[in-house]
């Protein structure tokens, strides 16, 4: 039999890290001491009290049956309370909250609920790949909005062609931003709400890094913006906030019709997240959030070690006030891929070439703060030798 994958699958963008992955595997095989700053996955364990709640809940037979795909009442109520405490939002847990099997799941499924062939979706680039892939899976088309340093890594909404706008349905935003580490000021969200109302757009905001912030900066919810609840849905994740990437738990909040559409898709493709995991998430969200503070302290220290080290080597790395990414310009005369390969081969340092997140990411590498401070210092020391 000759199995040919669908046009939908063949239309997916090529995977740009084949060569780099091969070099990494080779180096590991040779026994090189790799410092991996490539993946956005916390190295710290999930706090104990969350694990304990899972263990307890896993023993209860009432949690062994099918969950509801929208999420347990208790989970959705806890989410609403957390959003009240954290953002001052008053949400109806019935109609304005949905449980997700990780926010990636919701981000990928949401377009299925609202897009038709011929529709356009406005997607930031460089960016998290799932916005574009969800668009393709829904049979719609992507218009990429470049995130440029000169615009503080905010999209220039005024430059979107009128022909695209006429048939555009969704505007994706993601702040604090992966991969650039940028944050959005309230004025930008106000502009986005106005723009969405003018052009009949749904605003999908990915808030995966809302809690990973430093230096006293507090990220707001997009839904706090006046008028945002008429046009918006926001995707949240416990993955980065509570070191729970492996658990697959997140939630969506927003306009009841948008949440209902997403729930309808989900009820047809999944049967919800394991109730015991939802119970553990409840423990995380209703805790005093001191574990979140600890997490912020760890990354702020790492960030300072890496950024000051890079600057000593005359690499003008920004000091992000959110996310665990340092979006670093490559030295003159290098490309993203070239510099990443050099770091890999000569220093055993794995980073992600910026162009892998979209063409405007060329000229940058993304360094994730997912190793301890002493390893980041070691990375800077190795880099110094390479650049010497
Ligand atoms: C990590 C990440 C997510 C998804 O996290 P889940 O583990 O699926 O909840 C979503 N968006 C961005 C930008 C991310 O970096």
Image (cartoon, rainbow, N blue to C red):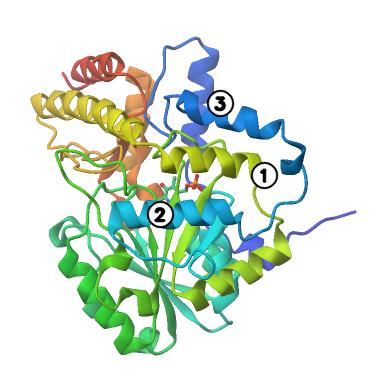
| Circle on res. 274 | 1
Q: Residue 242 in the image: x percent, y percent?
A: 42, 36
In this picture, is 382 found above or below 66?
Answer: above
Q: Which residue is mark 3?
A: 52
Tell which residue pokes out farthest to the top in this image.
31
Between circles 3 and 1, the one closer to the viewer is 3
In this picture, is 81 found above or below 234?
Answer: above
Whether residue 304 sits left or right of residue 339 in the image: it is: left
Secondary structure of the residue carrying numbered label 1: loop
Q: Nearer the viewer, residue 232 or 363?
A: 232
Whether residue 325 sits left or right of residue 170 in the image: it is: left
Q: Earlier in the sequence, mark 3 or mark 1?
A: 3
Q: Quadrant of residue 345?
A: top left
Tags 2 and 3 touching, CB below 8 Å: no
Q: Which residue is mark 2?
A: 81
Between circles 2 and 1, the one closer to the viewer is 2
Q: Residue 169 in the image: x percent, y percent?
A: 45, 81
Q: CA distance from mark 3 to mark 1?
A: 15 Å
């Amino acid at each position: 039999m000759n199995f040919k994958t669908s046009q939908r699958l063949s239309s997916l963008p090529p995977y740009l890290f084949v060569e780099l992955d091969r070099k990494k595997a080779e180096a590991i095989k040779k026994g090189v001491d790799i410092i991996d700053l490539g993946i956005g996955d916390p190295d710290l364990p999930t706090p104990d009290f969350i694990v304990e709640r899972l263990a307890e809940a896993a023993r209860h037979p009432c949690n062994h049956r099918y969950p509801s795909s929208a999420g347990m009442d208790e989970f959705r109520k806890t989410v609403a309370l957390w959003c009240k405490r954290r953002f001052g939002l008053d949400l109806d847990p019935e109609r304005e909250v949905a449980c997700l099997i990780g926010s990636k799941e919701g981000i990928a499924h949401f377009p299925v609920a609202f897009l038709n062939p011929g529709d356009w979706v406005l997607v930031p680039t460089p960016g998290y790949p799932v916005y574009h892939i969800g668009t393709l899976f829904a049979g719609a088309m992507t218009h990429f909005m470049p995130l440029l340093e000169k615009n503080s890594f905010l999209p220039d909404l005024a430059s979107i062609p009128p022909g695209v706008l006429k048939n555009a349905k969704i505007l994706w935003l993601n702040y604090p931003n992966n991969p650039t580490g940028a944050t959005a000021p309230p004025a930008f969200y106000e502009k986005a709400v106005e723009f969405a109302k003018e052009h009949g757009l749904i605003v999908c905001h990915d808030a995966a890094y809302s809690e990973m912030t430093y230096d006293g900066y507090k990220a707001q919810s997009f839904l706090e913006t006046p008028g945002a609840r008429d046009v918006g849905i926001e995707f949240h994740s416990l993955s980065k906030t509570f070191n729970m990437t492996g658990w697959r738990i997140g939630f969506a909040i927003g306009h009841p019709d948008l949440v209902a559409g997403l729930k309808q898709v989900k009820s047809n493709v999944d049967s919800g997240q394991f109730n015991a995991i939802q119970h553990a998430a409840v423990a995380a969200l209703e805790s005093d959030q001191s574990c979140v503070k600890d997490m912020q302290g760890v990354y702020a220290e790492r960030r300072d070690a890496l950024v000051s080290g890079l600057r000593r080597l005359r690499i003008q790395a920004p000091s992000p006030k959110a996310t665990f990414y340092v979006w670093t310009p490559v030295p003159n005369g290098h490309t993203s891929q070239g510099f990443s390969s050099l770091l890999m081969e000569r220093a055993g340092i794995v980073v992600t070439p910026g162009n892998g997140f979209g063409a405007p990411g060329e000229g940058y590498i993304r360094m994730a703060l997912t190793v301890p401070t002493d390893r980041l210092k070691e990375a800077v020391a190795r880099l110094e030798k390479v650049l010497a």
